[in-house]
Image: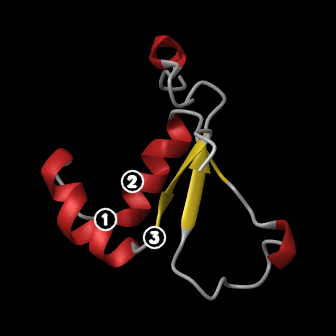
């Protein structure tokens, strides 16, 4: 909503319909592993403390250089060595 993260609202559908268009797989865990390698972090909802499985299938990821309207920052998102 504020342009500092992105959400995957339905992981099953995302893996089935979106991932194969851009990757050679449809594995959500592999996609999350790739995000982590590029410095993205999963946003944990404080109300749930990160210990309880959320009721909705909503996963949020953020990166300091992934900001809506600031495309010039994208060049700073690099794979960790």
Which element carries disc 1, helix, strand or loop?
loop
Give the Cα separation between the discs numbered 2 and 3.
15 Å
Counting residues from the start of the chain, the first of labels 2 and 3 encountered is 3
Residue 7: percent from the left, percent from the top?
A: 51, 58
The residue identified by callout 1 is 27
The residue identified by callout 3 is 9
Residue shown at 48% from the left, 44% from the top: 35
Residue 70: percent from the left, percent from the top?
A: 52, 19
Q: Is residue 58 above or below residue 1?
A: below
Residue shown at 53% from the left, 15% from the top: 73
The total of numbered circles placed on residues is: 3
Could you tell whether 28 is left or right of 19 in the image?
A: right
Residue shown at 52% from the left, 37% from the top: 37
Q: Is residue 79 above or below residue 9?
A: above
Query: Do labels 2 and 1 touch, CB within 8 Å?
Result: yes
Residue 12: percent from the left, percent from the top?
A: 33, 77
Q: Which mark is residue 31?
A: 2
């Amino acid at each position: 909503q504020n342009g500092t993260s992105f959400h995957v609202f339905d992981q099953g559908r995302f893996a089935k319909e979106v991932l194969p268009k851009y990757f050679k797989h449809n594995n959500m865990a592999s996609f999350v592993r790739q995000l982590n390698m590029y410095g993205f972090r999963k946003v944990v909802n404080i109300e749930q403390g990160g210990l309880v499985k959320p009721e909705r299938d909503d996963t949020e990821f953020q990166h300091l250089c992934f900001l809506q309207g600031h495309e010039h920052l994208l060049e700073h998102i690099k794979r960790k060595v």
